[in-house]
Amino acid sequence: MSLQGAGPFVVGIDLGGTKTLAGVVGADNQILGRSKRSTPAKEGGPAIVQTIVQCVDDALKSAGLTRNDIAAAGIGSPGPLDPETGVVLFSANMNVRNFPLGPDLSAVLQRPVLLQNDVRVGGYGEFRLGAGRGYQNIVAAFVGTGIGGSLIVDGKIFTGSTGNAGELGHIIVKTGGPKCGCGAHGCVEALASRTAIARRISKAIRKGHPSVLSDKLAKKSGRLKSGELADAIARNDQVAIREVQRAAHYLGVCLSGLSNVLGPELFIIGGGVAGALGDSYVDLVRASARRHMITDPDGKIRIVRAALGDDAGILGASLLARERFVTV
């Protein structure tokens, strides 16, 4: 592979509670080398930085480059965080608090590092290079273990006066509903995430309803992968089908409320659940949302599946870092 003319190169990093992804991205926004490692979430900040650096070095090696060849790095991390200082304020999934992730990574790489919320980074990647190309006002919802949101208003990430706007997973869609990890009851995350779907399937199994997922859920303490859920649906598992329909309904209710308030041009549905279940899942979400929208009688607002998969975070992080630090 010839890299001539592809620079300046930027590294995009997608830091998650279970895995860390890194990619070397050229000026044409092509990923030239990539790497994946498990995140040592329980070991704290220094171990996480070490893993990120190893992941970056692996990606550089696969691209035939070294640290000296990169101009900057961008990283999407679970938050809340302070993008201006590069500090992760808190992350329950990664056992860190007030950790200077950006500065510490910059000190090792000897390059400027931009830190932003992981879901915002993924939404920005879809906006610029994926399903959102050509639009300026977008809401992206990523459905996996939890539900995260990203708002793009007039072509820019919108964070509001608090810096934390976009937490659509904690919009309450059922008063008195199940308790969410945030402490509230009835959040869409507690009703429509993969975790919520697995919990409902487990409950149905305990009540005597047959499911091909019985053994998997028993062995994995109620945890479920998106691919396993998709496989159950492909095998016509009625419990799985019913609970996915239920979850899609509540996500649609959430999106309809956002539509009535914000009036975006486009909703993008991403994350592991949408990736595994495909367009049929998005169709269910869309149908539910349409039933509750009152401000879009002509159906102008589109609801589509994300296009970039796991690359959304890498590309979004690299784009933001390039815009901040690289002058071409």
Image (cartoon, helix red, strand yellow):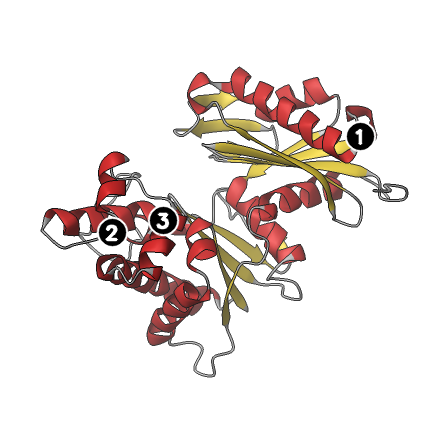
Q: Amino acid at mark 1?
A: Leu
Find numbered disc 3 in the image and state the secondary structure of the residue it sits on. Answer: helix
Q: Position of residue 26 (x, y in %)?
A: 78, 43
Q: CA distance from mark 1 to mark 2?
A: 47 Å
Residue where numbered disc 2 is placed: 212
Q: Nearer the viewer, residue 107 or 23?
A: 23
Q: Nearer the viewer, mark 1 or mark 2?
A: 2
Q: CA distance from mark 1 to mark 3?
A: 37 Å
Q: Is residue 175 left or right of residue 301?
A: left
Instruction: Identify whether 156 is placed above or below 34.
Output: below
Find numbered disc 2 in the image and state the secondary structure of the residue it sits on. Answer: loop
Q: Is residue 295 left or right of residue 45?
A: left
Q: Is residue 260 left or right of residue 158?
A: left
Going from N to C along the chain, the mark reached first, 1 or 3, is 1
Residue where numbered disc 3 is placed: 228
Residue where numbered disc 1 is placed: 65
Residues packed near mark 1 inside 10 Å, few (<14), some (14 to 19) or many (20 plus): some
Image-quadrant location for residue 240: bottom left
